[in-house]
Image (cartoon, rainbow, N blue to C red):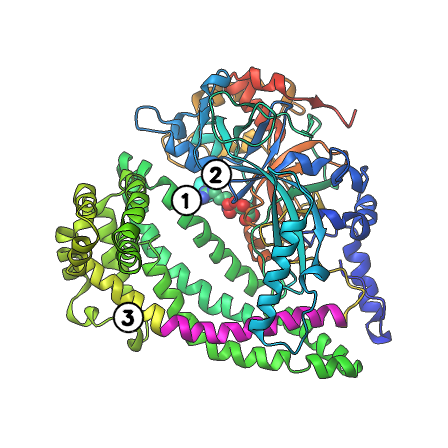
Amino acid sequence: MYTFKIIRARHFWFLLSAFIATSAFAGEGMWLPFLLKSLNETEMKSMGMKMNAEDIYSVNQGSLKDAVVHFGGFCTAEVISDQGLILTNHHCGYSSIQSHSTLEKNYLKNGFWAPNHEAEIPNPGLFATFIIRIEDVTDQVLEGVKTDMEVKEKQTLIDANLNLIKSTTTKEQWQDVMIKPFFEANQYYMFVTETYNDVRYVGSPPESIGKFGADTDNWVWPRHTGDFSVFRIYAGPDNRPAAYSPDNKPLIPRHFFPISLDGVAEGDFTLVFGFPGKTNEYLPSYAVDQIANVIDPERIEIRNISLGIMDKHMRSEPDARLAYAVKYAGLANSWKKWIGEAQGLKTYHAVQKKKNLELDFIDELQRKKSLCKEYGEILPSMKRLYKEIEPVVKNRTILSEVIGGSNIELFRLTLYADRLVNAFKQNGEDGFQKMATRTLAQLDDFYKDYRKDVDKEIFVALISHLSVTVSPEYLPAYLAKYKSDDLAEKIYSQSIWIFKEKFAESIQKGGASFSSLVNDDMAFQLFEELKEIMDSDLSPAYNVLNDSIQIQQKSYMAALMAVYPDRRFWPDANNTMRFTYGQVEPYTPRDGVEYKTQTYLDGVMEKYKPGDYEFDVDPRLISLYENKDYGQYGENGKMPVCFIASNHTTGGNSGSPAIDAYGNLIGINFDRVWEGTMSDLFYDKSICRNIMVDVRYILFIIDKFAGAGNLIEEMKLVHPKS
Ligand code: ARG
Ligand code: ASP
């Protein structure tokens, strides 16, 4: 909700009615915990929250923030016992679960539950980060910086200031300091953190529960997915972060979430706490237009092709299914989101609404003459710059999707080779050997899940696509010489990297002979040509224009804050700890349709398709359903599964705790509704909803389905409503 102090008469009634309409459910915003007291507490209480700001964020006593961790740097997890037990999404634990799975011991398919601590499985590389405290350090970072300084001079001074703050901040020796720019680098905040590197896999339900509905249901409400997995944080003997050791002990946390068995009702207050990755809420209309009409459509088309081919193989070949599960899920997730985003931006007239906001901004500037001088040129410049950058963006989007290595996997290998050749060029045999060690380790992972026939089919299709969509001046000479299937025939039968042993052997020959070998290789030559186009033509053109856009965007942010001094601004998500609050609310996706807030196990059974890889249901779950054997977790003879609310979330918020008015866990966040996926660019509170798994479903699956009652015993179950 926006609040204005100066309200002009002609806008008064409009604003007043908007205020009344929106004050019942403020939803927009990913707020910073350390500013909660000053910016949000009053509103949160008016929406039903029974806690105080200090219960949520405090540096002096255990508070909710001490039970929320950044999971592996890409998701969120929460502590749910005094023995370091943490809960996150199934899709967040997915690659760990997959890495421990084989066709014989398939934890993705069948699930897994460690019967005791000894059986919990370590995950090298996986970490969990706690936030100890957050401070505004803008003044120190910008100390001595003058507006008329050269960019370079400014940056050197800022870097020196950052180093000074980092080295003088009070912290324990096992803690880290991170300083990040906010509001387009108009402000800087510091985070003191504690990272634990021994995080073990405790359990997860079978995919038929944890990923029920898979990609068909992804980004869609109503939803019936039990998207959760369980891990545990281990600490050294002093309870501090320690590298993995069998002697480590379960972490004793500063706080853990009690779990509510009372469920939610429409209108209930909800708080979601986590690490949202990236939003772009303050872009001008021209940028949003470009995303909806150029960038999203290009990316969608390319992935239509690669995903179609993967899907065909996965449906009929079990080994392709296991090998491509993680890759497919990753590619499909953004692909489907872009489709929803582009559609939502159009349906809900985001560009026009942004334009209206810009008109109001210009109007305000005209009344505030001094600001007009400083900021009056921003929007016209942005308009010109976005027009100029459009063709570059289009070609760059296509090329980077094709050569990035996620669609055509061969290009991941050529990228490894490119890295090795460069290491040799720059640092001789020594440099080559260092890179070789790293690469040889990555090759194991790569080839474990590589299928040459699938990759070749994708290569043919995408190289043909590239030839007809990219402007001729950005096409490699190679493609004029060969048709894509002839090229594929040659490359996929000859190239050294198609076979792991061949590739590994050539690396072992040392830098000089490796370099000459790959330089003669067709796949490498094609990749180098494409990369050269990217590095020498497209990227420089893009960077020049984009740098200018960034400078304008920074001024635009500052201008918005200056022009509307009484509006509460929240900074775009940037992978730092945030909270968002809303209420359990239904929504109307289109005329005549209203979506309810809660789903039940009955819905799982409605969607059940025996043998289908997305909608199969485990016989044990069917029998629990038929006997209504829900234990203490059911509600009026039904088993709740998922619910929605109006919390503003984004990628990275997956696994975030959904918390009730009193600070108890009621669910875990995992997705957003289809109509509202545009919320990263434009939040519309009438249709943007986040989706959570009901915590009672999680407990039911752990206890009644999996029989892992030992875990339930560690938790604290409460009844806040009775
Ligand atoms: N859409 C959710 C998010 O962005 C869930 C993704 C995982 N599920 C899947 N079917 N790929 O991460
Ligand atoms: N599913 C997302 C995640 O993994 C959350 C979202 O984008 O709503 O973080």
Residue 465 painted magenta:
no
The mark nearer the N terminus, 2 or 1, is 2
Q: Residue at x 53, y 28 (%)?
A: 230
Say few, some or many: other residues with alpha carbon within 10 Å of mark 1 (under 14 / 14 to 19 / 20 or more).
Answer: some
- Give how far apart the Cα atoms at labels 2 and 3 are: 36 Å
Image quarter (top left, top right, bottom left or bottom right) of the C terminus: top right
Figure check: 359 above or below 501: below
Figure check: 537 above or below 519: below
Q: Is mark 1 within 8 Å of ligand 1?
A: yes
Q: Residue at x 80, y 37 (%)?
A: 51
In terms of depth relative to the viewer, which is nearer, 218 or 327? Answer: 327
Q: Where residue 356 appears, x then y in whole percent?
A: 68, 73
Marks 1 and 2: in contact by CB < 8 Å?
yes
| Local secondary structure at mark 1 | helix
Classify residue 692 by image quadrant: top right
In terms of depth relative to the viewer, which is nearer, 577 or 487? Answer: 577
Classify residue 523 by image quadrant: bottom left
**Residue type, mark 3 in image:** Val
Q: Residue at x 35, y 74 (%)?
A: 537
Q: Nearer the viewer, mark 2 or mark 3?
A: 2
Marks 3 and 1: in contact by CB < 8 Å?
no
**Residue type, mark 1 in image:** Ala
Instruction: Look at the image and tell me whether residue 423 can be seen.
Output: yes
Q: Which label is found at residue 91?
A: 2
| Local secondary structure at mark 3 | helix
**Residue type, mark 2 in image:** His
- Give how far apart the Cα atoms at labels 1 and 3 are: 28 Å
Q: Which residues are magenta?
A: 537-562
| Mark 1, residue position | 329
Q: Is mark 2 within 8 Å of ligand 1?
A: yes
In terms of depth relative to the viewer, which is nearer, 458 or 54? Answer: 54
